């Protein structure tokens, strides 16, 4: 309202509240495009709306979030129109990024593009696309990497369903819907702070894909991460790159394998696990369709210019600097073979041109001086065929060719007693020392021959010159022979089909090397040496078998292990040691009974002329005029000396009380009053409800007369009804 007399304007409380509310919002006429400040009390967030949709959020915790959903082709979530105007060092976007004290296990992304392509059916997506018109710039590069910066690091792999997926439980039970790869099922996760999930696989992995049905509200769950180390639910914190933005989006969480320095199997689940924990309260929870994992292979172009890739498709490999004396240092090939690629060091003093001819290459046209040393590589197929005499095989291929033994092995194509084989390549003639192997199709019935590569048949002999006997070769047996050019025979050097393993006599020094050596069988018709084994001093070796062994061995009958110390009341046991005890061995004995003096106690409940009562749930005798409490016991046979006799009380008042005590000691066969003593008017301060011990042995001069197996009676009387007897502790030292 206006106050004309005082030139002032007054507002009611309602008008002031409306004015303050209006100041926190800047809006258009219909209120669907606006800027708001703190929609909730003290949340410190600015929000931008367009056409009723939140487009951008700015806050201390949220940073700057921009939200955009296209409704037409060619739209952009953010556009920067920059005119450098011929000025130098003009940047359209300048990011000043400070890593801070990051350490091993921390991954950070200055620009993170998390691409969700679940709905894609084709097409191409470019994380960064750089286009340029024609012009006069010296060069335009899509990416420039400075010193100490590696241009590219690629992690190659595919996503697969994980082995483990648990929801706020250590396992081993999995939530099937979390790991089934299906959008037909879902799991509600991260319901409250400190809720966690485990995603695991049988082998280590470096990426997790999350497909989310209902994401977390802004600003996300603020997750923390841990990787499993060997043991039960043991996790080490680390910081991967989070493409889900705190589970506000479907996306990828990724890290380098080197970040997880001790990734091990979680014994609760049996897998290599990643633990993700919610730390920030948000409205609602997250509904997850599924998670998948990927184990990746790393390829790179590093800061020093080294490139690691799976394959390169190129027309030419050129020297970096075309000058005299500069050469390609090395070309590392997977199998030593390159088909159709010229790997040349043309500036080397001797031109080592290593390549395949194709009918029009420079090997044919070069002069002798230009050629220097010329080596033509055989292809894998040519090397395997073994028929080309003009090409060379690289050292890396030679072992493979020998291991394949195709040049000396072939199946038998002949008949019984007349064996034939055709190795590749075929041999032109027999030569001394040639070795061949063939797999016999038939058993022999007597003297036999072998023909190789269609050449003349040659006898197969054994033991030098002896003809074969029936079944020396069995059907299906692999037979090895070596050619003797002098006798023109093939001598069989593999085991005869009807001979015991090893065949022939065994030289005496092949088995028995020293006095005491034994021979033991290690299979059918086979034996090995068991050398004598001399024991150390005070030990004895015996020949025997341990459980699971099939061949006897020397075993030490005794060892240096001390016998165990037995505990009181140990139960008898058969034991499991395969060692024997020495006759003079000694077991350690425990302290106390049976092993030295120890303190023992006997507990004796009270009795009286009245019924046992109960106070504060303690059974007891309540003393009063005319009521005497008493205790009786037999002194144990291991009694040596008395420590104490304590009357245990439960007072029902706090005061100093007075009591009379008597004690009688008698041995078996003596009168019950053979040794008695009374002590009167003894006092003790007591506190209500506090268990109290009243040591009385010091009152009796006859306490020192107590001996093993005596019978002992102790009485207590008092006119004060606050003394309530719980029991008696008789403490002594035993033998």
Image (cartoon, rainbow, N blue to C red):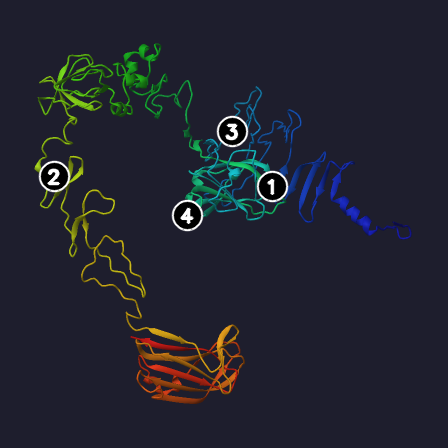
The circle on residue 143 is: 3
Q: Are marks 2 and 4 in contact (CB under 8 Å)?
A: no
Q: CA distance from mark 2 to mark 4?
A: 49 Å
Q: CA distance from mark 3 to mark 4?
A: 45 Å
**Of 703 and 91, the residue lying toward us:** 703
The residue that mark 1 highlights is: 216
Q: Mark 2 or mark 3: name the one nearer the start of the chain.
A: 3
User: Helix, strand or loop at disc 2?
Assistant: helix
Where is residue 4? Give x, y as percent: 91, 50
Task: Determine the residue positioned at 20% across, 47% down.
Answer: 545
Q: Mark 3 or mark 4: name the one nearer the start of the chain.
A: 3
Q: Residues within 10 Å of mark 3 (few under 14, many from 20)?
A: few
Q: Mark 3 or mark 1: name the one nearer the start of the chain.
A: 3
Q: Mark 1 or mark 4: name the one nearer the start of the chain.
A: 1
Q: Nearer the viewer, mark 2 or mark 3?
A: 2
Q: Mark 2 or mark 4: name the one nearer the start of the chain.
A: 4
The circle on residue 511 is: 2
Q: Residues within 10 Å of mark 1 (few under 14, many from 20)?
A: many
Q: Looking at this view, name the residue that lies furthest to the right.
A: 5
Where is residue 370? Give x, y as percent: 30, 14
Quadrant position of the C terminus in the picture: bottom left
Whether residue 558 is visible here, answered yes or no, is yes
The residue that mark 4 highlights is: 231
Q: CA distance from mark 3 to mark 1?
A: 35 Å
């Amino acid at each position: 309202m206006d106050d004309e007399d005082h030139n002032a304007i007054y507002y009611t409380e309602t008008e002031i509240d409306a004015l303050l509310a209006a100041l926190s919002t800047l809006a258009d006429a219909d209120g669907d495009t606006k800027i708001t400040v703190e929609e909730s009390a003290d949340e410190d967030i600015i929000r931008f709306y367009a056409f009723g949709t939140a487009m951008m959020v700015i806050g201390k915790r949220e940073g700057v979030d921009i939200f955009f959903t296209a409704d037409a082709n060619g739209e952009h979530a953010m556009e920067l129109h920059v005119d450098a105007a011929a000025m130098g060092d003009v940047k359209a976007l300048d990011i000043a990024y400070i890593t801070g004290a990051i350490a091993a296990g921390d991954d950070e992304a200055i620009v993170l593009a998390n691409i969700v392509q679940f709905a894609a059916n084709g097409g191409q997506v470019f994380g960064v696309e750089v286009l340029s018109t024609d012009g006069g710039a010296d060069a335009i590069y899509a990416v420039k990497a400075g010193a100490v910066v590696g241009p590219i690091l690629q992690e190659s792999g595919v996503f697969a369903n994980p082995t483990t997926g648990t929801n706020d439980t250590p396992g081993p039970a999995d939530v099937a819907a979390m790991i089934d790869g299906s959008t037909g099922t879902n799991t509600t996760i991260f319901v409250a702070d400190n809720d966690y999930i485990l995603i695991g696989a049988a082998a280590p992995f470096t990426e997790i894909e999350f497909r989310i049905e209902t994401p977390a509200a802004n600003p996300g769950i603020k997750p923390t991460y841990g990787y499993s180390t060997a043991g039960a639910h043991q996790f080490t914190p680390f910081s991967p790159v989070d493409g889900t933005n705190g589970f506000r989006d479907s996306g990828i969480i990724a890290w380098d394998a080197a970040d997880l320095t001790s990734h091990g199997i979680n014994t609760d689940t049996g897998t290599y696990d990643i633990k993700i924990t919610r730390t920030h309260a948000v409205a609602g929870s997250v509904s997850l369709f599924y998670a998948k994992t990927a184990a990746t292979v790393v390829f790179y172009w590093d800061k020093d210019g080294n490139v690691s890739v799976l394959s390169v498709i190129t027309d030419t490999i050129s020297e970096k600097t075309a000058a005299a004396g500069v050469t390609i240092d090395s070309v590392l090939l997977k199998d030593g073979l390159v088909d159709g690629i010229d790997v040349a060091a043309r500036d080397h003093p001797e031109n080592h041109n290593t390549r395949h001819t194709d009918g029009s290459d420079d090997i044919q046209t070069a002069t002798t001086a230009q050629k220097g040393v010329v080596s033509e590589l055989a292809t894998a197929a040519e090397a395997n065929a073994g028929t080309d005499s003009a090409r060379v095989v690289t050292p890396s291929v030679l072992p493979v060719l020998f291991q394949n033994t195709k040049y000396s092995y072939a199946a038998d194509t002949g008949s019984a007693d007349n064996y034939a084989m055709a190795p590749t390549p075929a041999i032109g003639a027999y030569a001394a020392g040639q070795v061949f192997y063939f797999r016999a199709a038939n058993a022999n019935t007597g003297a036999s021959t072998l023909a190789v590569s269609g050449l003349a048949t040659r006898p197969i002999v054994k033991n030098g010159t002896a003809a074969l006997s029936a079944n020396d070769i069995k059907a299906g047996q692999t037979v090895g022979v070596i050619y003797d050019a002098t006798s023109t025979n093939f001598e069989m050097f593999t085991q005869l089909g009807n001979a015991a393993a090893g065949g022939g006599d065994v030289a005496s020094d092949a088995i028995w090397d020293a006095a005491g050596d034994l021979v033991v069988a290690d299979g059918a018709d086979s034996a090995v040496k068991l050398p004598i084994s001399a024991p150390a001093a005070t030990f004895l070796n015996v020949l025997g078998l341990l459980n699971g062994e099939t061949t006897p061995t020397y075993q030490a009958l005794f060892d240096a292990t001390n016998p165990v110390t037995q505990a009181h009341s140990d139960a008898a046991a058969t034991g499991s040691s395969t060692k024997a005890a020495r006759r003079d061995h000694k077991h350690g004995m425990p302290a106390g009974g049976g092993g030295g003096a120890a303190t023992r106690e006997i507990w004796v409940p009270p009795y009286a002329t009245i019924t046992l009562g109960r106070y504060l749930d303690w059974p007891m005798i309540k003393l009063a005029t005319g009521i005497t409490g008493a205790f009786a016991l037999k002194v144990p046979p291991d009694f040596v000396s008395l420590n104490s006799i304590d009357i245990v009380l439960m007072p029902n008042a706090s005061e100093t009380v007075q009591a009379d005590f008597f004690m009688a000691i008698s041995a078996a066969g003596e009168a019950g009053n053979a040794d008695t003593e009374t002590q009167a008017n003894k006092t003790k301060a007591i506190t209500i409800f506090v268990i109290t011990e009243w040591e009385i042995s010091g009152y009796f001069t006859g306490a020192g007369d107590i001996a093993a197996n005596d019978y002992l009676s102790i009485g207590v009387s008092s006119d004060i009804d606050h003394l309530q007897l719980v029991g008696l502790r008789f403490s002594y030292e035993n033998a």
